[in-house]
């Protein structure tokens, strides 16, 4: 359990780093006329991610979930790969990356890096991490609950983002 708490703590630190980058990029975007889209669903996304990071260790502790190496190690590898994909997306988008949907008029749509192959690669990272992080320590209720909530949120988010990105210069 202690190692799992360290992993959750590291993911929390990673999220805080993301938020710092997002805050800096949001200021940069707004200074250039950036427009935020879909503001209403953003607090729900934040709540879902906070719930994931709180519920997974709570489930492990309260329900005595064991670490099952045959499941835990592959799920840890999936979490690490998801983090790599997430930061590849952040690096590829540069100043245009944000946790919010913000479009700066006149900027072209980014089509390099993982965006060469996938329309929303960052959301793939979120999906993988959302089920893999709890399953590192067999917190399957959290994995199922987050995956269901995240699917509903991403259905809204991708529609909002696709509409916003349609306004970018090709």
Image (tube, rainbow, N blue to C red):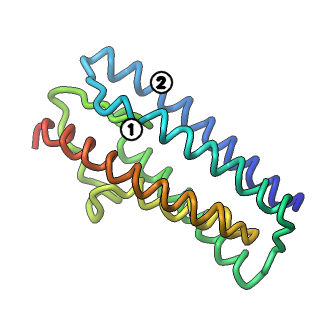
Residue 66 lies, with reference to residue 18, above or below; the image says below
- Of residues 88 and 129, the one nearer the viewer is 129
20 to the left or right of 104: right
Residue in the foreground of this view, choosing between 136 and 107: 136
Q: Quadrant of the C terminus?
A: top left
Residue 147 versus residue 47 in the image, above or below: below
Which residue is at a point 66% across and 65% down the rendered structure image? 141
Q: Nearer the viewer, residue 107 or 23?
A: 23
Residue beneath disc 1: 97
On the picture, is 47 further left or further right than 1?
left
* Crowd class of label 1 (few under 14; some 14 to 19; many from 20; radius 10 Å): many
In the image, residue 145 sits, relative to residue 156, either above or below, namely below
Query: Which residue occupies 31% across, 33% down?
Result: 38
Q: Which mark is residue 120?
A: none
Pick out the residue farthest to the right.
2
The tally of labels here is 2
- Could you say whether the residue bearing mark 2 is in a helix, strand or loop? helix
The label on residue 24 is 2
Residue shown at 22% from the left, 46% from the top: 162
* Sequence-first tag of 1 and 2: 2
Q: Position of residue 35 (x, y in %)?
A: 26, 24
Relative image position of residue 27 (x, y in whole percent): 41, 19
The answer to whether residue 77 is left or right of residue 7 is left
Q: Image quadrant of residue 4?
A: bottom right
Q: Residues within 10 Å of mark 2 (few under 14, many from 20)?
A: some
Q: Quadrant of residue 58?
A: bottom right
Residue drawn at 61 percent across, 67 percent down: 132
């Amino acid at each position: 359990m202690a190692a799992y708490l360290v992993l959750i703590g590291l993911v929390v630190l990673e999220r805080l780093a993301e938020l710092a980058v997002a805050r800096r990029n949001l200021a940069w975007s707004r200074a250039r006329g950036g427009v935020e889209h879909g503001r209403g669903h953003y607090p729900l996304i934040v709540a879902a991610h906070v719930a994931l990071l709180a519920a997974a260790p709570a489930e492990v502790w309260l329900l005595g979930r064991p670490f099952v190496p045959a499941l835990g190690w592959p799920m840890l590898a999936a979490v690490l790969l998801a983090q790599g994909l997430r930061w590849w997306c952040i690096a590829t988008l540069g100043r245009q990356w944000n946790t919010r949907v913000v479009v700066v008029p006149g900027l072209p749509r980014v089509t390099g890096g993982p965006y060469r192959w996938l329309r929303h690669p960052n959301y793939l990272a979120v999906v993988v991490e959302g089920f893999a992080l709890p399953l590192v320590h067999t917190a399957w209720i959290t994995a199922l609950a987050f995956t269901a909530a995240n699917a509903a949120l991403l259905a809204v988010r991708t529609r909002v983002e696709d509409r916003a990105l349609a306004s970018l210069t090709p």
